[in-house]
Amino acid sequence: MTSTSSLMAGSPSLLPPSSKTRDSPVRSGLLFARPFSNPRRSRSLGQRWTHGGAKIELQANTRLFCSWKNHDQRINGKGALGLSTEHHQSLACFRSRKLCRGHAIRQAGSFRNKPTFSIHRHPFWSNARKSVQIAYAALGPDEPHVANTAWSEALLDKPSIWVSEAEKTEIEGVLSSPLPPHPKLHRGQLKNGLRYIILPNKLPANRFEAHMEVHVGSINEEEDEQGIAHMIEHVAFLGSKKREKLLGTGARSNAYTDFHHTVFHVHSPTTSKASEDLLPSVLDALDEIAFHPKFLASRVEKERRAILSELQMMNTIEYRVDCQLLQHLHSENKLSKRFPIGLEEQIKKWDADKIRKFHERWYFPANATLYLVGDIDDVPKAVEQIKTVFDRTLEDEVPNIKSSNAFGAMASFLVPKLPSGLAGSLSTDRSSIPSGQQKATEKEKHALRAPIEHNWSLPGFGRGAKLPEIFQHELIQQFSINMFCKSSNPPFTSIEMDHSDSGREGCTVTTLTVTAEPNNWRDAIKVAVHEVRRLKEFGVTNGELTRYMDALIKDSEQVATMIDSVPSVDNLDFIMESDALGHTVMDQRQAHESLVAIAETVTLEEVNSIGAEVLEFISDYGKPTAPLPAAIVACVPKKVHIDGVGESEFNIHPYEIVAAMKEGLEEPIHAEPELEVPKELISSSELEALRVQRKPSFVPLQEGNTMKLFDKETGIMQIRLSNGIPVNYKISKNEARCGVMRLIVGGGRSTETSESKGAVVVGVRTLSEGGCVGSFSREQVELFCVNHLVNCSLESNEEFICMEFRFTLRDDGMRAAFQLLHMVLEHSVWLEDAFDRSKQLYLSYYRSIPKSLERSTAHKIMVAMLNGDERFVEPTPQSLENLTLHSVKEAVMNQFVRDNMEVNIVGDFSEKDLESCILDYLGTVRTDSTARTVQSFDPIVFRPSPSDLQSQQVYLKDTDERACAYIAGPAPNRWGFTVDGKDLFDLIKSSSVNDEQSNSEKSLHLERKDVLDKPINDIRQHPLFFGVTLGLLAEIINSRLFTTVRDSLGLTYDVSFELSLFDRLNFGWYVISVTSTPSKVYKAVDACKNVLRGLHNNKIAQRELDRAKRTLTMKHEAESKTNAYWLGLLAHLQSSSTPRKDISCIKDLNALYEAATVEDVYMAYEHLKVDDNSLFSCIGVAGAQTGEDASGAIDDVTDIGEQGFSPIGRGLSTMTRPTA
């Protein structure tokens, strides 16, 4: 980790971000030198507890989850339908939301990812829709307990779908009215056919996004061209000299290829340091990349090597599973045969001439769209700059628009509908083009989506259904089955139960995905289809529909309030997708108004009728009238572990899968009663009693008699409660009407002893699995969070246990979040069945390690480097067996003591409201009368050297060849402490005695928290000195690794250097990760070592340091506009375990970057141990012929790396890798 890690609390991870990125067979891209290291950290799947806005798309998931748990808690420890908890911890969890998606909402919750609810719908009285009678599911009264309903139930309470003529006319008018276009969106087209779209957007300030989208992808390739679009992307992008000139400006650039598009994009400052406008330079670079590349033989060969390495790197078992799903889902068309990464045997053959011809056929202005989003004040000026650059490109050629429709029945959904103001340039009427221009061109404007034919899942074709397909592989750990249903409805109007793709595949796909332990696959299938049938037959209740529609509207309203807080890149992503699909682009306010307008036209009967139709392909499977599933694909292991037996062959037949489905559908179903949802977790009378009993108040800070310590420059307030809990908060308008809160508890896994290995990580997972507080069930807590738009997650790492809340300021969302935090601290519930599931889950993780090349390789180096310390790896089966519910509860709750906790809050709230919540819900947490501190932990040591384990290898038997390697070694922690007990600041002080500088210039007190606005006379005395200089060093090393190992030597596609810097533990480590081919991986490792050790011989140049400074300062400035980043900055401000963290570490960051010299960076480098006795390496090779089997890698302990299973489903395979 780099600059971010120097300030933000986080868990170090051995696997760097690049190895944790899920690869996609349907999208390929350049892995360019990272402009800044990504601070993403590996987070254990079993360490998350999430409550939050439930999925609006269907109540099915909540229903399935409840029944799943009731049926058999051990079928799958991962929640509903066996969803990987990396994807869903619970069915009501939030995903990180891109707020610009507010114009097309499908899901509730302010922090969801890619919500897409289509406003355009057929009127429910349409004759084209089949009427389906649905019984009501509610068994009790009409849900008087449902809280915070913001819309009328008048229509919901109607007994039938028939309405009066007046009502029908009014509703029809609402639904048939055109959607308003985005008022700030500017569209146009040059005379050479290039379309451009401009959207002024102020966040981040003084920066813009420029994306050139060429409408060609792998779907346009011929049989002998598979992968050539991706090859052109590499050659054109990395061969551009004009793009290289942007590198010193602070701009970042990248590219990717998918089925339908090749996209080149630049994220740039608006002006250079010399105040020169950078837009013309960026446009000039994009023009050269897209339309004037130089196909030099040397560049072609470099990128050929890189792509072949990328192909092997991507070819994980998750990628192969994903490809299998796509191949069977789209077996009738080219989507199943045109993965953008291409075919190895063809990639090896193409010469520059072959590549150039493909480029000439597809890459021209009339077949491209330029998107410009960012801080653009003068749109007319930007238009003129676009014309200046691009009008000279093929200006004698004008697009020849085909009159035939390239999309057939899908045309109305997939062809962009442009306003007539574009001079009719996209009209299908060729007469609209001046006759003088028609004869000037032979090139044609290609469709934005190549025509794709699909076999739809239509009713009445249930006979003759294909048997399930089975993909069996030795590297698959769990059983999973995917049932797909295709429809020709527009993308983004689907109902998803597990995973649903959008327009990239040209169809709507409804998917039921079931994942389970292989030994429980039959029960898993039966429960899943049984619950789908129950939902189809009984539908949702009045209360459910009211609750989720209310949450949807609340979410939409919240997004509308944040209209000025949406980053440019998020707006741009949405516009690009909407434009390609012909959707109307609205701003967030317009979207909310449109949603409100149609909300009261929705009836319970309509929802259940549509839901029944969508679910028929599962609920009526095998019936003549049922829609024919597009595909049923089971991905299964070759061997499974059976207790007492060991590894056994796993046998399964398609007929057995069909039989299990039919058994589940034949079981009797009953309507479930409505679940009572609490309006509050702590009543007003209970709260008043707590106030009287515990008398909460603020007390003076440790620094003196100051009751509150406020810093005007940063806006940070520090306070402390009478029960000892310190609180830091910042009022911020960055995200309107939103807030975030994080509880940090010191200790984490480092407190585990030799007798309690795994107790903390399993304990946190147990609390997460149970999800209960007080007398409230998990389902009640989840729905409470839905009503208040609250997201809660619980995680643990090596140093801390963290509980994080995201909330909105409407409907008492902040108070609801504080109530939930209070209940967890005071009334957490520990359940035996949740403990059993947690142990089973970690047992599965352990057994999966030998089936992953990256994990087994990372495991070996971690065990070697840290001398087998199990606190940094997955608990072993023996350790899990020794745990009890009592032991894991004690391990977790003993850390929740008053002087070991800190609460940080950032958001758009008032001081009065926030401090009221702090006093009411944190101040009333009981005081620990013994004032215990968290127990001490066993020391952590690196393995003594020399050792036979410093250089190791892992061999993994696989059908395909792959290779990866890790190089790691010790580093200081963030605050200058080393694993051998040294305080590096003492060394600095000792060495400075001989300097001529006076002692008065070095007067910062490192051990105190009263450092205020003092000048930085010597940055080497600043507490953040090593955090800053190590971050700069990481950027420089990353750049050199890419230039040398990837670009010059051609030994890898992906190489990265990452720092893991602890806060509480007195050490850190670095890791270089590199992917390659088996024949090159050893040379790649040697080259990486040479770069790492070569900084003395090949001195750091000032320009390298300046570039690293620009990258990190710009990153800091950009991220400081988000609440989450400030939450990280506040971490440990009052923590006794990190005494050097003070307000100067936040205030002085930019000044520290600017003041750092090459000599300062070398001082940090001196304490990065890179000598032979300190450095560890492990090379992993997979192939048909293996040496040592990777199963030996888990003899003692398991991996800390990529924990858990990647979700299986389409999405890995729609585009190539972009730059991280």
Image (cartoon, helix red, strand yellow):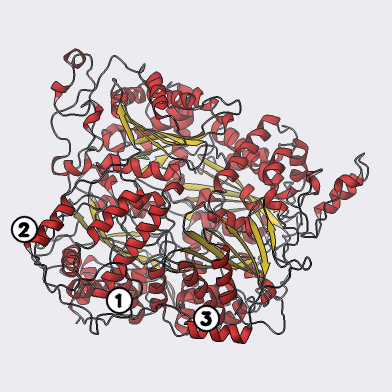
Mark 1 or mark 2, earlier in chain: 2
Identify which amino acid the numbered label 3 is placed on.
Ser
Q: Nearer the viewer, residue 975 or 418?
A: 418
Is residue 135 positioned above or below 472 on the image?
below
Mark 3 or mark 1, earlier in chain: 1
417 left or right of 945 in image: left
In the rendered image, residue 918, in percent from the top left (x then y), is placed at 58, 71
Q: CA distance from mark 1 to mark 2?
A: 40 Å
Q: Quadrant of residue 621?
A: bottom left
**Callouts 3 and 1 close, C-beta under 8 Å:** no
Q: CA distance from mark 3 to mark 1?
A: 31 Å
Q: CA distance from mark 2 to mark 3?
A: 53 Å
Q: Residues within 10 Å of mark 3 (few under 14, many from 20)?
A: some
Mark closer to the observer (2, 3): 2
Mark closer to the observer (3, 1): 3
Is residue 277 positioned above or below 708 on the image?
above
Q: Residues within 10 Å of mark 1 (few under 14, many from 20)?
A: some
Identify which amino acid the numbered label 2 is placed on.
Asn
453 left or right of 552 in image: left
Disc 1 designates what residue?
523
Disc 2 designates what residue?
127
Mark 2 or mark 3, earlier in chain: 2
Q: Quadrant of residue 666?
A: bottom left
- Residue 876 seen in the figure: no
Identify which amino acid the numbered label 1 is placed on.
Asp
Disc 3 designates what residue?
828
Dot 3 falls on a residue whose secondary structure is loop
Dot 1 falls on a residue whose secondary structure is helix
